[in-house]
């Protein structure tokens, strides 16, 4: 058996490591365990903020560093503490929202507050995906801006996710960044923030370089991570924009796409 060719395996969560029921298959768990036994590190890189990620990491027995909040938070899972945290300038975010709404009309809003216990606020009309993730509804717009935020979520009653992302980027691209992170999930982030920025910080702490990294993802917000890593693997269920820049496409998250690639590399 040849040595595993990478020192770091970076995986997105939703649509990538997780199946639709938010579980990780035994096959994928075994493949990741074999990779770490071979000397590589596994790092989770997710758009979810820490409060929506912690229970999954705990279930996996994950005790290393994770990148959360689209790169805004570097989190030590074993010690349950934030190592770094970047917040969204609320004045700039408010200006960006007003410009977008002037272009396409009212938006439904949600926001992720900063911190280990940061709440996710859901405004009127925001369509919440069914599942176990906790959120706090709000009616008064002032509540949205009352505490530091990592990001905003925006939805439009008529535009598709792709259309909303494109128009928002064209309208406010010099003020903030706009990414599509999943079905119904379009986010406003601090300008220059991406999964790649968070992953590079975490990798530096681990003493690992981009050239040592293989990354797995499924959505356009994973594009910067693929650009940073030596090898990017899109899941079979991945968005076409990510597939277009991937080095390879594997099986879907429901078909153990991560394990398929890791097992091949382990047996090469």
Image (cartoon, grey):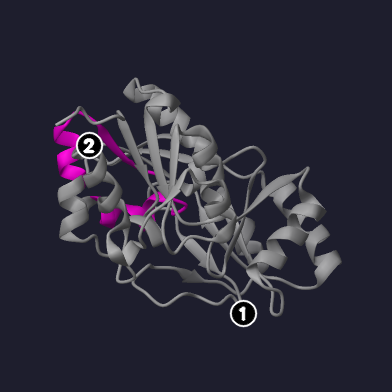
Magenta part of the protein: which range?
32-57
- The answer to which quarter of the image holds residue 78 is top left
The answer to whether residue 108 shows anywhere in this view is: yes
What is the distance, in whole Å, between disc 2 and disc 1 at their CAs?
51 Å
- The residue under label 2 is 268
Q: Is residue 43 magenta?
A: yes
Q: Residue furthest right?
A: 102
Disc number placed over residue 47 in the picture, else none? none
Pointer 2: residues within 10 angstroms few (<14), some, or many (20+)?
Answer: few
Closer to the camera in the image, 105 or 44: 44
Q: Quadrant of the N terminus?
A: top left
Pointer 1: residues within 10 angstroms few (<14), some, or many (20+)?
Answer: few
Query: On the rendered structure, is 98 left or right of 107?
Result: right
Asked if 183 appears above or below 90 in the picture, the reply is below
Q: Is residue 253 magenta?
A: no
Asked if 55 appears above or below 121 in the picture, the reply is above
Closer to the camera in the image, 222 or 1: 1
Circle 1: element type: loop
Q: Quadrant of the C terminus?
A: top left
Disc number placed over residue 125 in the picture, else none? 1
Closer to the camera in the image, 243 or 147: 243
Circle 2: element type: loop
Q: Residue at x 40, y 62 (%)?
A: 15
The answer to whether residue 147 shows anywhere in this view is: no
Please state which of the two labelled residues, at mark 2 or mark 1, is closer to the viewer: 2
Q: Residue furthest top?
A: 207
Query: On the rendered structure, is 266 left or right of 200?
Result: left
Q: Is tag 2's residue or tag 1's residue first in the polypeptide sequence? A: 1
Q: Residue at x 41, y 23 (%)?
A: 209
């Amino acid at each position: 058996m040849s040595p595993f060719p990478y020192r770091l395996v970076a995986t997105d969560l939703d649509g990538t490591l997780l199946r639709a029921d938010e579980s990780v298959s035994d096959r994928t768990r075994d493949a990741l365990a074999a990779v770490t036994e071979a000397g590589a590190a596994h790092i989770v890189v997710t758009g979810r903020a820490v409060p929506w990620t912690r229970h999954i990491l705990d279930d996996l027995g994950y005790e290393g560093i994770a990148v959360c909040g689209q790169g805004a938070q570097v989190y030590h899972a074993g010690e349950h503490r934030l190592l770094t945290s970047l917040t969204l300038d609320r004045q700039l975010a408010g200006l960006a929202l007003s410009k977008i709404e002037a272009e396409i009309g009212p938006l439904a809003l949600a926001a992720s507050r900063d911190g280990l216990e940061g709440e996710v606020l859901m405004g009127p009309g925001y369509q919440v995906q069914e599942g176990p993730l906790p959120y706090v509804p709000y009616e008064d717009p002032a509540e949205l801006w009352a505490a530091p935020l990592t990001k905003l979520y925006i939805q439009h009653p008529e535009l598709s996710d792709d259309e909303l992302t494109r128009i928002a980027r064209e309208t406010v691209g010099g003020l903030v960044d706009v990414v599509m992170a999943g079905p119904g999930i379009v986010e406003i982030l601090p300008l220059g923030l991406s999964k790649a920025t968070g992953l590079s910080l975490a990798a530096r702490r681990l003493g690992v370089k981009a050239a040592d990294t293989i990354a797995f993802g499924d959505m356009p917000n994973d594009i910067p991570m693929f650009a940073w890593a030596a090898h990017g693997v899109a899941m079979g269920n991945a968005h076409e924009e990510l597939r277009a820049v991937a080095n390879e496409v594997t099986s879907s998250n429901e078909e153990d796409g991560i394990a398929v690639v890791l097992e091949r590399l382990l047996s090469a």
